Image: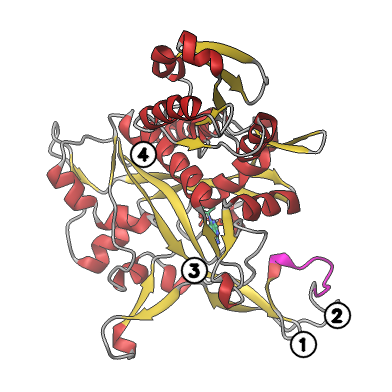
């Protein structure tokens, strides 16, 4: 984990937030390479679950919603974690963070206060007066917007059940014990789908789509993130530990270096959310079956993915060392830079001109880096460290045969390809869209 964090800082994937002011505990900023990696993950997700499907449409809702939303959803009353405080050093922890009743900060044993519940929502005030009546919350999950916008989506789109509404966006939680780099932060991003189904007449009516989404989560993890499923564990959450709205929940956990922990989740939320929003808003949130005319409140299956945890898993999973050299074996379509272009020598204008032409041309297709410092070996090493899958070298022979050498990150194999064939050569190997 330390090695991944060090690489992220050294190469500009992820920096400590507000660093010049001494930082802000557990806040992180994505740097130039990190933002590309994160965007590629979001883009791959949107492509798989929105663009390639006919039954899912996307929205992008406001971060601050009417505070009644959070009353209806149960978050004001229930979105809380049990907190304990060490009486010796006054450090506060989420209860499940403490092992063997020992304070991780001062080592105090049995020094904790009784549990008290702490609401995780971030409060703010709308308008210039900081009064109780103006209190609002930064959304603690993206999900509620899909319920609140349900009527608008149904009325404006031609959708028939079952269908899903998807969203990618920021969520905020005043976590008691954030940490482990970007694993648990107070500001993070989620990719969520609310998949609406008719009210089940039997258990299998919801278990069927639940199972489909269970497989979809695994397929995404293996195919899009390139993560071996032997490192993923499905944890069936017992009824006593499930969120207030859920009839079944599976946590998809990953073998993080700091222990097995949640990566994604899947929940059957019944009609809890839409029914509550109908009650609180006084608006009709029923779906009308176009064939039978029957009106009902749909039920919902919710697969949910953390963006930042996806980034972390991809980084951890791709990190390899070979004789002390770091090679980040990112799936090519997630790599921040797809291709690096080098002139063999930086002081030969012919080579530089030819290489610059290729660089400028390929930039229209995907992200391309330029490097003319040091020798070729060093340039390869530098690109391997950030996961660039292909490097192109323009040499003296290129001036004669209009071909370049392409070197593959993982196999280190080199092949000669005509410049005119470069785009077709890369096609399908690295593009997301
Ligand atoms: P945890 O048990 O780790 O607190 P959770 O069960 O509360 O997580 P959900 O409410 O199911 O999490 O949120 C959906 C997804 O959002 C999680 O699977 C995770 O990927 C991501 N997530 C939740 N909280 C955080 C956080 N504080 N920092 C980063 N990602 C988070």
**Residue located beneath label 2 in the image:** 108
Q: Which residue is mark 4?
A: 200
User: What's the distance in space between the residues labelled 4 and 2, CA to CA?
Assistant: 51 Å
- The Cα–Cα distance between marks 2 and 1, rounded to whole angstroms, is 9 Å
Give the image location of residue 73, x and y in percent.
Answer: 37, 64
Q: Nearer the viewer, mark 3 or mark 1?
A: 1
Q: Residue at x 56, y 26 (%)?
A: 391
Label 2: element kind:
loop
Circle 2 Cα neighbour tier, 10 Å, few/some/many (<14 / 14–19 / ≥20): some
Confirm whether residue 304 shows in the render: no
Q: CA distance from mark 1 to mark 4?
A: 50 Å
Q: Which residue is mark 1?
A: 87
Nearer to us of marks 2 and 3 is 2
Give the position of the C terminus as an image quadrant: top left
Q: Residues within 10 Å of mark 3 (few under 14, many from 20)?
A: some
Mark linked to residue 79:
3
Mark nearest the camera among 3 and 4 is: 3
Q: Secondary structure at mark 3?
A: loop
Residue 408 shows in the view: yes
Residue at 55% x, 37% y: name it: 371
Q: Quadrant of ligand 1?
A: bottom right
Magenta part of the chain: 96-103
Q: Are marks 2 and 1 in contact (CB under 8 Å)?
A: yes
């Amino acid at each position: 984990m330390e090695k991944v964090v060090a690489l992220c800082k050294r190469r500009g994937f992820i920096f400590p937030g507000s660093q010049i002011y001494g930082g802000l505990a557990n806040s992180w900023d994505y740097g130039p390479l990190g933002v590309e990696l994160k965007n590629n993950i979001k883009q791959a997700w949107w492509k798989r679950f929105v663009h390639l499907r006919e039954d899912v449409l996307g929205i992008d809702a406001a971060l601050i919603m009417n505070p009644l939303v959070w009353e209806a959803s149960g978050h004001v009353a229930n979105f809380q974690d049990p907190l304990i405080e060490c009486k010796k050093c006054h450090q506060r922890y989420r209860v499940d963070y403490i092992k063997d009743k020992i304070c991780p900060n001062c080592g105090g044993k049995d020094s904790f206060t009784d549990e008290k519940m702490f609401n995780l929502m971030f409060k703010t005030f709308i308008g210039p007066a900081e009064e109780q009546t103006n209190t609002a919350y930064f959304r603690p999950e993206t999900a509620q917007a899909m319920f609140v916008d349900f009527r608008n989506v149904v009325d404006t789109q031609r959708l028939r059940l079952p269908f899903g509404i998807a969203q990618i966006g920021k969520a905020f939680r005043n976590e008691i014990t954030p940490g482990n780099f970007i694993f648990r932060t107070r500001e993070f991003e989620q990719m969520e789908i609310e998949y609406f189904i008719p009210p089940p007449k039997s258990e299998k009516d919801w278990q069927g789509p639940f199972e489909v989404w269970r497989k979809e989560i695994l397929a995404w993890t293996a195919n899009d993130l390139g993560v071996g499923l032997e490192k993923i564990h499905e944890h069936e959450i017992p009824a006593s530990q499930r969120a207030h709205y859920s009839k079944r929940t599976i946590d998809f956990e990953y073998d993080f270096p700091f222990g097995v922990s949640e990566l994604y989740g899947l929940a059957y939320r019944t009609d809890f959310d839409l029914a509550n929003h109908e009650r609180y808003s006084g608006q009709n949130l029923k779906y009308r079956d176009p064939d039978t005319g029957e009106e009902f409140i749909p039920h919902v299956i919710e697969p949910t993915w953390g963006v930042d945890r996806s980034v972390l898993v991809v980084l951890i999973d791709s990190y390899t060392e070979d004789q002390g050299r770091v090679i980040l074996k990112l799936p090519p379509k997630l790599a921040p830079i797809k291709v690096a272009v080098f002139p063999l020598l930086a002081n030969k204008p012919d080579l530089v001109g030819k290489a610059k032409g290729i660089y400028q041309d390929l930039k229209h297709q995907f992200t391309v880096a330029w490097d003319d410092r040091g020798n070729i070996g060093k340039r390869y090493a530098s690109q391997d460290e950030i996961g660039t899958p292909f490097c192109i070298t323009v040499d003296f022979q290129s001036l004669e045969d209009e071909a370049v050498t392409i070197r593959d990150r993982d196999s280190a194999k080199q092949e000669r390809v005509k410049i005119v064939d470069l785009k077709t050569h890369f096609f399908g190997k690295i593009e997301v869209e």
